[in-house]
Image (tube, rainbow, N blue to C red):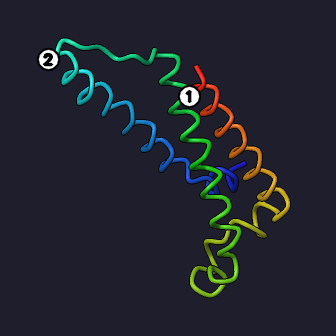
Amino acid sequence: MISFLKLIRLPNLLIIALTQYMIRLFLIEPILNLAGMYLQISDLEFFLLVFATVLVAAGGYIINDYFDVRIDQINKPNQLVIDKGVKRRVAMGAHAVLSFIGVAIGLVISWR
């Protein structure tokens, strides 16, 4: 489990989510309020949008590590996650699942 969290770079994903919420709360909403406008996306839809972004980013981190295994064996042999902590097949499956769910959520939000 720890290896998988390293693979998806959990701290980076938290920063992505936090950044999106901070921009919404402290930049976009105040500017819209000054102009007499309001957000057209609900809190639930925004949460789903952020969640979809985080899922796609996690899938991206996985596929990046998958294709960089050979280079990382030379440059960072002590920090390898794929093959040491997570099997290649599991990494590819996780990438496919996370990316698919993230894109599907994004499509549902955009369709609404």
Residue 26 lies in what quarter of the image?
A: top left
- Report the residue marked by disc 2: 34
- Type of residue at label 1? Ser
User: Which label is found at residue 60?
Assistant: none
Q: Quadrant of residue 23?
A: top left
Which of the two labelled residues, at mark 1 and mark 2, occupies the earlier sequence position? Answer: 2
Q: Within 10 angstroms of label 2, few (less than 14), some, or many (20 or more) residues? A: few
x then y, percent, for residue 102:
64, 39
Label 2 is placed on what type of residue?
Answer: Leu
Instruction: Give the secondary structure at mark 2.
Output: helix
Residue 43 in the figure: left or right of residue 63: left
Q: From the top left corner, tell me how far across and down residue 94 is, in percent.
A: 76, 50
Q: Which residue is more in the foreground, 92 or 37?
A: 37
* Mark number, residue 110: 1
96 or 37, which lies in front? 37
Residue, far right:
89
Rendered residue at 60%/46% (across/down):
56
